[in-house]
Image (spheres, rainbow, N blue to C red):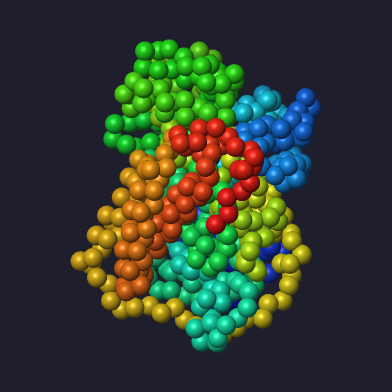
């Protein structure tokens, strides 16, 4: 057993900010199943949204967020998050994050930050670090965490299960309510499972877009935190709202990477194969419409023409802006033989972000006592049915900071006797195909039947298939020694089922959930959250 005051599962912006805050009042363990820098935060190109310009206002940011979220966001949550934005951008600057600044300014004043505009925003309010914002934030936070004597870091360790009364009651009878006392964690190198006991546990494991075969996410985004919380009894909310990013790079091999929305903010235009523009036919804001609108428009046009991709044309944007603001995209495009300064980029939508997740407050509090959740793994009520661009890093930062400063972090906890993990000796190599094959099938089913445009017949078919897949995976899980890939695939199936069930519950189209059987919004019945 490893004993800590605080256990952080996940190492993106939410996990590291929380760890730095609680390290002031106890010993912290950060558990991450890959390296510290392998997370969705590090993949975030565009930036972090906040009201940093004198011509902007909190009210305008609130209205943009509410509108992008198809009016399902919670006003009180939105207001609280955006009002903390400037203070916590300053926090990141103080931590060492090197945001891009206006020419000639190298101080730490927020008014000298360079700001860009992205889809759905009425003002330039996105602070950025070229086109590697998330990476720069992560690098500064990792430096702070690694030099903090109160923080121990466990890379290449995967959390298998939260330790709750479900484990304890096997030996000690029923314990009322649900409390978390840490997690069972596997060392990926040795396959040994240890108890990480903690007074407070933070789930900061990110999203689950890897359940879709075509996605923009890190390889670690397999829904682990959401699945563990669901197995332990926490509620999941709004899981049908999976945001597809309109512009991921298209290659015949299937390899992809994100093309930031900030490129459209600087004037890049979406075009069809014949060079024609089309977004003005779908929304007054054209190429800067909210992401759900742009993704559906592209999907519709591609299906209409039988094309696999369209183009993002940045050739009219000044060369110096492209090279200064988007060096990462320039480098990656050149690897595929494309010079985006003089020719358009082939793109197609890809699964990108979960607007839903574990039901949590603005302080990260969940249904389960002593368990916090922050970042993409959680649903605070900020995003509603569709996320406004660059609000994700803002939400992660604010809620993790709030959770790290919550008074309950000082509470004493009475620990029950925690049983060791029951690790089996057998591992049936002949049946390993159950895991490898089903993992691929999950991605294929979700792409085909639960994508940008849905219908209820295919959703029902997908649910039936996915429940059978989960039963196969869980049977293997119950009768074999645990391996990281088994845990991940179990989690992917759990979250895929949650997405499909939520999509079937919502008999309307709103935000990132569009179903052809009910193509209109229905505020009379469905201006509510979908809760599992």
The answer to whether residue 501 is visible is yes
Residue at the front extreme of this rendering:
524
Residue under the point 55% across and 32% down = 520
Q: Nearer the viewer, residue 65 or 407?
A: 65
499 w.r.t. 483: above or below? above
Image spot of residue 476 (x, y percent): 31, 68
Quarter-wise, where is residue 431 in the image? bottom left
Q: Position of residue 472 (x, y in %)?
A: 31, 63
Q: Is residue 73 left or right of residue 341?
A: right
Residue in front for this viewpoint, 49 or 230: 230
Q: Residue furthest bottom?
A: 172
Which residue: 57% across, 24% down?
A: 288
Q: Does any portion of residue 102 appear in the rendered image?
A: no
Q: Left of 154 or right of it: where is 77?
A: right
Q: Position of residue 239 (x, y in %)?
A: 52, 49
Q: Residue at x 60, y 62 (%)?
A: 202
Q: Quadrant of the C terminus?
A: bottom right
What is the count of numbered marks? 0
In this view, 58 is above or below 150:
above
Q: Position of residue 465 (x, y in %)?
A: 33, 53
As drawn, is 53 to the left or to the right of 498?
right
Task: Give left or right: position of 256 versus 296.
Answer: left
Residue occupying image coordinates x 72% and y 76%: 412
The one of 341 and 174 positioned closer to us in this rendering: 174
């Amino acid at each position: 057993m490893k004993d800590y005051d605080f256990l952080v599962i996940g190492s993106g912006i939410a996990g590291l900010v929380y760890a730095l805050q609680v390290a002031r009042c106890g010993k912290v363990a950060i558990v991450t199943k890959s390296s510290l820098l392998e997370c969705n935060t590090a993949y975030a190109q565009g930036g972090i949204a906040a009201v940093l310009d004198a011509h902007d206002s909190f009210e305008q940011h609130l209205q943009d967020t509410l509108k992008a979220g198809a009016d399902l966001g919670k006003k009180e949550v939105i207001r609280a998050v955006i009002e903390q934005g400037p203070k916590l951008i300053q926090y990141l600057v103080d931590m060492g994050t090197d945001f891009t600044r206006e020419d000639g300014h190298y101080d730490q004043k927020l008014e000298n930050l360079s700001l860009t505009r992205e889809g759905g925003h009425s003002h330039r309010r996105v602070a950025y670090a070229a086109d590697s914002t998330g990476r720069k934030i992560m690098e500064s936070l990792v430096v702070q965490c690694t030099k903090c004597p109160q923080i121990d870091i466990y890379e290449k360790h995967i959390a298998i299960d939260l330790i709750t009364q479900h484990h304890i009651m096997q030996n000690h009878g029923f314990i009322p309510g649900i409390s978390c006392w840490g997690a069972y964690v596997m060392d990926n190198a040795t396959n040994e499972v240890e108890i990480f006991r903690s007074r407070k546990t933070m789930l900061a494991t990110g999203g689950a877009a890897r359940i879709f075969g075509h996605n923009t996410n890190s390889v670690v985004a397999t829904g682990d935190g959401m699945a563990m919380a669901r197995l332990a009894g926490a509620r999941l909310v709004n899981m049908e709202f999976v945001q597809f990013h309109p512009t991921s790079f298209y290659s015949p091999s299937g390899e992809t990477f994100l093309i930031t929305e900030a490129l459209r903010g600087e004037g890049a235009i979406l075009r069809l194969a014949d060079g024609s523009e089309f977004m003005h036919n779908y929304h007054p804001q054209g190429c800067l419409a909210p992401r759900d609108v742009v993704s559906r428009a592209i999907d519709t046009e591609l299906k209409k023409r039988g094309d696999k991709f369209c183009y993002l044309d940045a050739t009219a944007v000044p060369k110096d802006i492209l090279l200064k603001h988007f060096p990462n995209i320039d480098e990656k495009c050149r690897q595929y033989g494309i010079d985006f300064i003089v020719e358009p980029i082939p793109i197609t939508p890809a699964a990108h972000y979960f607007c839903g997740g574990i039901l949590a407050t603005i302080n990260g509090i969940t249904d389960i006592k002593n368990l916090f959740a922050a970042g993409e793994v959680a649903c605070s009520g900020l995003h509603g049915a569709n996320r406004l661009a660059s609000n994700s890093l803002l939400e992660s930062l604010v809620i993790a900071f709030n959770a790290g400063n919550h008074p309950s972090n000082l509470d004493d906890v009475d620990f029950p006797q925690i049983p060791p993990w029951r690790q089996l000796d057998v591992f049936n190599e002949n049946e390993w195909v159950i895991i490898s094959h089903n993992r691929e099938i999950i991605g294929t089913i979700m792409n085909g039947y639960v994508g940008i445009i849905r219908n209820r017949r295919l959703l029902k078919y997908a649910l039936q298939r996915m429940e059978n897949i989960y039963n196969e995976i869980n049977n293997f899980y119950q009768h074999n020694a645990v391996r990281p890939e088994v845990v991940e695939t179990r989690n992917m199936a759990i979250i895929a089922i949650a997405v499909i069930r939520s999509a079937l519950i919502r008999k309307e189209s709103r935000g990132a959930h569009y179903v052809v059987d009910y193509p209109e919004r229905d505020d009379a019945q469905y201006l509510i959250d979908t809760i599992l």
